[in-house]
Amino acid sequence: MEEISERGATARPTPLAPSAYPAIKRLIDIVGAAILLVVLSPVFLIIGIAIALDTGLPVIYRCQRLARSGHPMVILKFRTMRNGSHQHLEGLLSNDEERRLEYALNRKLRNDPRQTRVGPILRRTSLDELPQLWNVLTGQMSLVGPRPYFIHELDGRPERSEILGLRPGLTGLWQVNGRSDRTFEDRIALDLDYAARRGLWLDLQILIQTPGAVLTGRGAY
């Protein structure tokens, strides 16, 4: 299938009435997340054991992000960083100009020295994101939508209300268009594009393209 771009060349208007789309989207979220949680439960167990054997407990990382309407929420991820990694970020960036510039551009670091031994594998395959299926099931997130932002990332930005008018997604235009190979500003643009064009047809295209994006590992680190 042709890659979805921010120019919207492949999107088609959904034939559903606008009022029907949110209800159907939520139904897909509930059914899809529930099925995936059951089917992937052995994978959860294997990953949890691998993390625990590598660097101990906890195996789940709880991170505060912005939910719809700008309220804080806690998203779940498999831990890919060593314990206390966030406390070491400031020191890491202050001592390395190249890394500081990279983090300012992408909000992430390639070859981050704070990662555990299994961390790079989980990130490349996006397996670290699987616990967010629980966030989808409980209604904090959707299967498709803008990526959840850190609390401070949208401060003072004019796009804040448009992006936070939607449930953040487990996958979205950013994930199928290069992920971390794109800059933070690209990510904002893609999320705004999704907010403007959202509909069942676009959601289905993103869901279909997500496994391929995950398998290629493009932009994942």
Image (tube, helix red, strand yellow):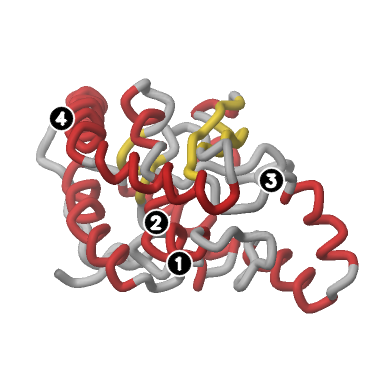
- Label 1 vs 4, first from the N-terminus: 4
Disc 2 versus disc 1: distance between alpha carbons?
A: 7 Å
Q: Position of residue 171 (x, y in %)?
A: 35, 49
**Eye-nearest disc, 2 or 3:** 3
Tell me: residue 61, above or below residue 194: above
- Label 2 vs 3, first from the N-terminus: 3
Residue of label 2 = 126
Dot label at residue 8:
none
Indicate the quadrant where residue 190 lies: bottom left
Label 4: how many Cα within 10 Å (few below 14, some 14–19, many 20+): few
Disc 3 secondary structure class: loop
Dot label at residue 83:
3
Q: Is residue 195 visible?
A: no
Q: Which residue is pictured at 23% across the width and 66% down the height?
A: 212
Q: Position of residue 4 (x, y in %)?
A: 28, 65
- Kind of residue indicated by mark 1: Ala
- Kind of residue indicated by mark 2: Ser
Left or right, residue 182 beside residue 193 = right
Tell me: residue 206, above or below residue 101: above
Left or right, residue 182 beside residue 195 = right
Q: Position of residue 98 (x, y in %)?
A: 78, 78
**Eye-nearest disc, 2 or 4:** 2
- Label 4 vs 3, first from the N-terminus: 4
